[in-house]
Every structure is written in structure tokens, then in C-alpha cells.
Amino acid sequence: MPNTARNAVSNNIIAASGLNPLKAARETRGYTIEELSLTCGLAVGEIIDIEDGKDADPAKLRRIASALQMPEEELITVPTEENRSIKQ
């Protein structure tokens, strides 16, 4: 594992990067995909798929959030009433 601190990272840094939130959080915390794979127990390919937007399994995102020591809400977004489109 990298020697970088695993302290909470500002949401502003992650948002400003323009990257996928998972990739931004992973890179900001100093993890390679391989290191994150070992830490959260997912395969490298699964993490790549999630970063590429091909997989959004909430159970996997929870494991990753736990490994990165971040609130899972930062990776798992649930649409709020205001964000849902109203069909008439």
C-alpha cells in the first residue's frame, strides 16, 4: 500500500478533478487499482468496469468506499425527488 495518508479528502478536490468520483478518490488517496483491489477484495477488472461506468453495483461501491475510508454516499448516488423527471 502507498505511504500516503488515508485521511478524509475534501470533496472539492475530487469534484474539481473532473474524473469519475471513484477514480478521483482512489488517485487522491494514493491507491493504484491493484492496491484497491487487494484492500476491498474486488478483482482489478471489476474496479476498472466501475471506474469506466460499466458497473454500479451498490454492494461493490460500499466495499470500495469502506476500503478508501470515505462515506459510501460519495460513490452511491440515489436520485432525490428534485432530480427525478416528472412524467405527465
Image: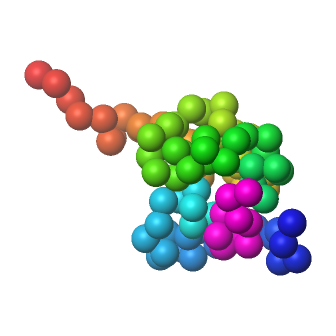
State the extent of the magenta-drawn residues as a range.
26-34
Q: Residue 42's x, y, as percent?
A: 72, 40
What residue lies at 61% left-to-right and 44% top-to-bottom?
45
Q: Residue 1's x, y, as percent?
A: 86, 66
Residue nearest the observer in this picture, 86 or 44 = 44
Q: Residue 80's x, y, as percent?
A: 41, 38
Can residue 6 be found in the magenta stretch?
no
What residue lies at 73% left-to-right and 57% top-to-bottom?
34
Q: Can residue 25 be seen? A: yes
Task: State which quarter of the image contains the C terminus.
Answer: top left
Q: Can residue 72 be seen? A: no
What residue lies at 53% left-to-right and 59% top-to-bottom?
21
Q: Is residue 75 above or below residue 10?
A: above
Q: Is residue 22 above or below residue 47?
A: below
What residue lies at 67% left-to-right and 48% top-to-bottom?
44
Q: Is residue 32 left or right of residue 81?
A: right
Can residue 27 be found in the magenta stretch?
yes
The residue positioned farthest toward the left in the image shown: 88
